[in-house]
Image: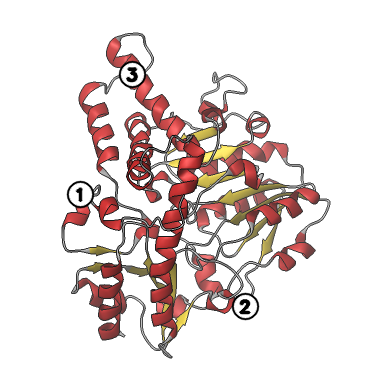
Amino acid sequence: MTNDTRLDAEFCRSHFPELSGDWVFMENAGGTLVPRQVIDRLTRYASHCQVQPGEGYPASDDAQAMIDEGRAALAAMINADPGEIVVGPSTTSNVYVLSHALAPLLAPGDEIIVTNQDHEANNGAWRRLETTGAVVREWKMNRETDDLELEDLEPLLNDRTKLVCFTHCSNIVGLIHDVKAIVKRIHQAGALACVDGVAYAPHRRVDVKDLDVDFYLYSPYKIFGPHLGVLYGKRELLSKTTNQNHYFVGAGDFQRSLCPGGPNHELTAAAAGIAGYFDALHDHHFPGANLARPERLANLFGLIAAHETAMAGRIEDYLASKPSIRIIGHGAAGRRERVSVFSFLVDGRDSREIPEKLRAARIGIYADDFYAARCIDAVGARPQNGVVRVSLVHYNAARDVDRLIEALDKAI
């Protein structure tokens, strides 16, 4: 990647049919738009091979091949092998099933650490294991930074700790945690780490092998794909999980035992369109570069991070300039990198009022707890009905930020 290469946002936008109108989409943390490559794959599957896959006749073989391509693409997004992931209906569902699959491996008194910052997907299911005899401890957000600090995890770790569940970055706070360092400390304590990467994966390259995570979660529908959830796990750990599917599913067949009912065929097939889209971006920005997929993704996410950071800086500067606005997590901004997700409160205002006013300017944002209810309570946002959230991805352009700032100035 050359230093002068910049993301061509207009080329990126040309792949998304919904961006041909006059709306600005800035609720991308809740789910991104999908490019034509994903739409075309879904249409192709539904039109030509919507049959039971893998049964030996042409349409069935085509179906299996498309599903396999989708699985491979979803694994490659996080530098995993297709045999190390489970493709399920959602991250919430994947964690629920995983928690049940691990429960028989825990002895009474074994401890699980969760946070009060995470999305409930990587939270509630683990807390419910208290009913089976597990002890649940809470890694609390630091009140000064609104974030999770490693020094606050330390006193919770002991020889009974078996699992620590935390987020790569919060869908509310947006600050990026040093997952590699945290996981190293967890492993030193003899425990496993389950990391929620849903809010992180749209913005930065994920390499589960480099992070050395035991379990990692992300949602393809938040990285320009169909509505699915992906669970990565170290193969030796997934092979030890107990079957959550039909009784006759074979031992060690975790791709089926951890996905009751099986994966969604057409959506898994369509997921290969994510890779097709990123390939198109790489060919456009780095013509003639003959690189393996990990290097291609590293190049692209370098461009994406730089583009998003430039836009996010303008938004953060604007919000910080308003005395009436409190940016969640702003206290740690100088110490830790953040993704382009901003949650904020306006003094004396119901948070739901702000998105309503911006809709008149054809800007889509939202106010809520965004399924991170414990985080919302921790930052004191419940009385204002949650936070206002603005979240960008790489297909947002500078003019989107212009319109957002202009509209916010009138609404606040």
- Nearer to us of marks 2 and 1 is 1
- Among the 4 quarters of the image, the one containing residue 251: top right
Residue 99 visible here: no
Q: In percent of the image, x 27 and y 74: which residue is there?
A: 402
Q: Which residue is mark 3?
A: 52
Within 10 Å of disc 3 (Cα), the crowding (few <14, some 14-19, many 20+) is few
x, y percent for residue 32: 34, 53
- Name the outermost residue toward the left: 21
Q: In percent of the image, x 33 and y 18: which residue is there?
A: 52
Q: Which residue is mark 2?
A: 143
- Name the outermost residue toward the bottom: 323
Looking at marks 2 and 3 on the same chain, the residue that comes earlier in the sequence is marked by: 3
Residue 202 vs residue 308, the one in the foreground: 308
Looking at marks 1 and 3 on the same chain, the residue that comes earlier in the sequence is marked by: 1
Within 10 Å of disc 1 (Cα), the crowding (few <14, some 14-19, many 20+) is few
x, y percent for residue 226: 34, 42
